[in-house]
Image (cartoon, grey):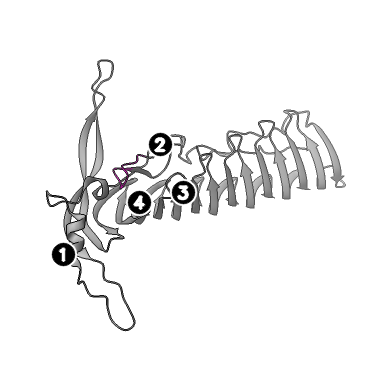
């Protein structure tokens, strides 16, 4: 699943033959007002025109089955609109100068969703990404399509609060468990070698590894009194294995920006590594279905 870009879907209205048009025109003979057009490449547009350009509310249908329904400004997607891509994914939200910009929601083919801020087709600002198959959710800051800065990864029975760098968890953070305790620690970048087969040259990759620290009770605030940490020892016993560290199944979590989705879950509570989707198969670096400048008569 990818954040497909409109640049991949060119609209063809240029050239000597502009296709068929039925609708309003101004005194100069330009398409102006409401009209329907069938372009030479088989695409169609129905909506508002202003002096030969798509301007106002309109619907553009591509022969590839992609479709945009929303606002235009001087032939470009601008304002609120919905773009449905050939693979079935769709974006609903704000557009600026033919690009996803502002607040919007992207629905991926695998039912994952991202809702939040965009800039130049990429997730950028505050937003949340939900994994449909596990229900896990990342909430936090995005920079150029990757998790960056403070964020929270929420799972069914625990969550991680900490910092991300270039799509990976890094630095101090803590795991908060529903059993009533939290573990403090930090993610440290560790180099690992991959590809040791005969036909593959070994490559070195850096992945985050959790370094466990102290266990503390979760203190819940009450208007009358703070919840005492009475069962601290019991909580620690439950959370620790015989080596004195949190069991691997609940102590590690990794968020990577891989080829499919912006936040993948490696080494978390169920040791799931989210398989990917975006253009890198899930990066909004792909261009968005772009409508060419019109020189209509």
SS for tag 2? Answer: loop
Q: Nearer the viewer, mark 2 or mark 3?
A: 2
Label 3 close to label 1 by CB (< 8 Å): no
Q: CA distance from mark 2 to mark 4?
A: 20 Å
SS for tag 3? Answer: strand
What secondary structure is the stretch in magenta mostly built from? loop
SS for tag 1? Answer: helix
Q: Earlier in the sequence, mark 3 or mark 1?
A: 3
| Left or right of 24, for residue 258 | left
Q: Which residues are magenta?
A: 266-273
Q: Which mark is residue 123?
A: 3
Which of these two is toward me, 273 or 127?
273
Q: Residue furthest right?
A: 27
| Left or right of 252, for residue 112 | right
Q: Which mark is residue 148?
A: 4
Does residue 51 appear in this view? no
Q: Earlier in the sequence, mark 4 or mark 3?
A: 3
SS for tag 4? Answer: strand
Which of these two is toward me, 97 or 283?
283
Q: Is 35 situated above or below 152?
A: above
């Amino acid at each position: 699943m990818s954040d497909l870009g409109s640049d991949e879907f060119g609209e063809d209205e240029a050239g000597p033959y502009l296709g068929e048009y039925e609708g309003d025109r101004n005194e100069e003979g330009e398409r102006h007002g409401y009209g329907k057009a069938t372009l030479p490449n088989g695409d169609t547009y129905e909506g508002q025109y202003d002096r030969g350009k798509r301007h106002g509310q309109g619907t553009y249908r591509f022969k590839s089955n992609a479709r945009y329904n929303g606002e235009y400004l001087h032939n470009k997607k601008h304002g609120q609109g919905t773009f449905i891509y050939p693979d079935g994914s769709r974006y609903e939200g704000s557009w600026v100068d033919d690009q996803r910009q502002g607040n919007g929601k992207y629905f991926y083919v695998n039912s994952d969703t991202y809702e939040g801020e965009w800039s130049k087709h990429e997730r950028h600002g505050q937003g949340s990404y939900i994994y449909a198959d596990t229900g896990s959710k990342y909430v936090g800051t995005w920079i150029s399509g990757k998790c960056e800065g403070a964020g929270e990864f929420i799972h069914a029975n625990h969550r991680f609060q900490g910092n991300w760098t270039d799509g990976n968890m890094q630095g101090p953070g803590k795991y908060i468990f529903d059993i009533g305790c939290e573990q403090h620690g930090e993610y440290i970048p560790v180099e690992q070698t991959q590809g040791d087969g005969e036909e593959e040259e070994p490559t070195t990759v850096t992945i985050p590894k959790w370094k466990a620290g102290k266990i503390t009770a979760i203190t819940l605030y009450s208007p009358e009194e703070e919840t005492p940490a009475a069962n601290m020892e019991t909580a620690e016993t439950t959370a620790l294995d015989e080596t004195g560290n949190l069991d691997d199944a609940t102590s590690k979590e990794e968020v990577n920006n891989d080829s499919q989705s912006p936040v993948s879950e490696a080494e978390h509570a169920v040791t799931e590594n989210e398989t990917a989707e975006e253009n890198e198969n899930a990066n909004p670096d792909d261009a968005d279905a772009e409508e060419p400048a019109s020189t209509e008569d």
